[in-house]
Image (spheres, rainbow, N blue to C red):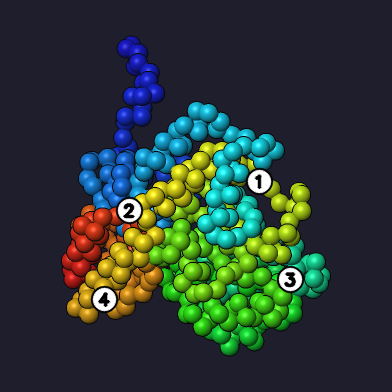
Amino acid sequence: MKQKKAKTSSEREQRFLTLEEARELEKLHLFPLFLKSRFPFVAVRGEGCYLWDAEGRRYLDFTSGGRAAAILGHCPSAVAEAVANQARTLLHVTGDFYAAPQLMLAKQLTEISGFDRAFICNSGTEANEAAIKLARKYAKSISAAKTEIITFEGSFHGRTYGALSATGQRNYQKGFEPLVPGFTHIPFNDEAALQRAASDSTCAVMLEPVLGESGVFPASEGFIRTTREVCDRRGALLIFDEVQTGLGRTGRLFAFEHFGVKPDVLTLAKGLGTGFPVAAMLARGRAAEAFAPGDHGTTFGGGPLACAAALACVQEIEKRELVDRARSLGELMMSRLRSIAAQVPAISQVRGLGLMVGVDTDGPRAAELRRACLERGLLIAGSTERTVRLLPPLVISEQDLERGLEAFRLAAEEI
Ligand SMILES: *Cc1c(COP(=O)(O)O)cnc(C)c1O
């Protein structure tokens, strides 16, 4: 019998999966959690705003890697090099060691945000967990009964128990009860409801300045001002979940800058490492003094590799003036989409801020629209049954943006 020669690892790396093989492996070995949302191709390579599949087909990525994280596009060389160099020098130590990347990142983030202290972790969910724990700890020093956290209907804060309990969407919570007690969900952008819900037991108000997952709904200025007033009056912390809006996505470095209001606690994740898992919880003033040694922690969070990626990413955002770019390209995108909405019956509404845009179809046709875009080589993100999201990388060229929007127009006309 002939013996099959074992494949070398580089040969194995070269072997691309077909879509059928990928689906079979998923079926056999993975929880079916992404079964409904996966794009029907095997991603093998990314560069800038483009992804390539195993057959060499190219896709224009208006999802920034699926969920808005890759704000510098795919494989930006500055970040790839920083990660590679750091991996060869010092890949891992915990916070039990001093290491420059974590300290430099904390310095960088507090300087650019005007916050006082940072906790570096691995995901948006974790940053929000840290914010929730910080708020409860802070409020305990005022009164043991000060534990209630107000969040908003349609919000998304993550999938672990604290963050899931904060999330204002029943569909994410169903089946996982009992949730963490002490969360009240009230309608977004409703100042009167907030005034009614707040009391001296309120420990924090937590919100996304632009509701992301649920369809891109920007907060109104009056509402945000009211959240600040209510928190000041009740001695509660104002927490902004800028996991999706932070780092330039909305045309400001942080979305809070649009509103002339500063939260006490800020969480960042998606764009921070342009896809590398890294996140931060920032606090200022008295909130920044609430954690004592040992109150919170993490093994991987703030590791040298992740912090090197985030440092390189933040430097690129500044060097390439991507915040201004997101603002001007966002205006261009919005004006094109408004004219599409006026001309194409399938598109009923457009909303957004910077390069974060939600588009409503005239019925439950989001999946159909995403399919039609895919057929034209354009990837757009999902949201609800009737809403899609356009979240291109901040580095996108005007030409690629126009190309994508033209494909979007044709797809919308076709459905
Ligand atoms: C994606 C997201 C999260 C969760 O972040 P993960 O990194 O997936 O844990 C939390 N809040 C908002 C606003 C998000 O968009």
Say few, some or many: other residues with alpha carbon within 10 Å of mark 1 (under 14 / 14 to 19 / 20 or more).
Answer: some
Disc 3 residue type (three-letter): Thr
The quarter of the picture where residue 17 lies is: top left
Q: Nearer the viewer, residue 239 or 166?
A: 239
Q: Is residue 327 left or right of residue 182?
A: left
Query: Element at badge 2?
Result: loop
Q: Residue at x 80, y 71 (%)?
A: 142
Sooner in the amino-acid sequence: mark 1 or mark 2: 1
Q: Nearer the viewer, residue 24 or 161?
A: 161
Task: Measure the alpha-carbon separation of dots 3 and 1.
Answer: 24 Å
Disc 4 residue type (three-letter): Arg
Residue 294 drawn at (x, y percent): 76, 48
Q: Is residue 387 left or right of residue 202?
A: left
Q: Can residue 154 be spotted in the picture?
A: no
Residue 160 drawn at (x, y percent): 60, 57
Sooner in the amino-acid sequence: mark 3 or mark 1: 3
- Residue behind mark 4: 338
Task: Measure the alpha-carbon separation of dots 1 and 4.
Answer: 45 Å
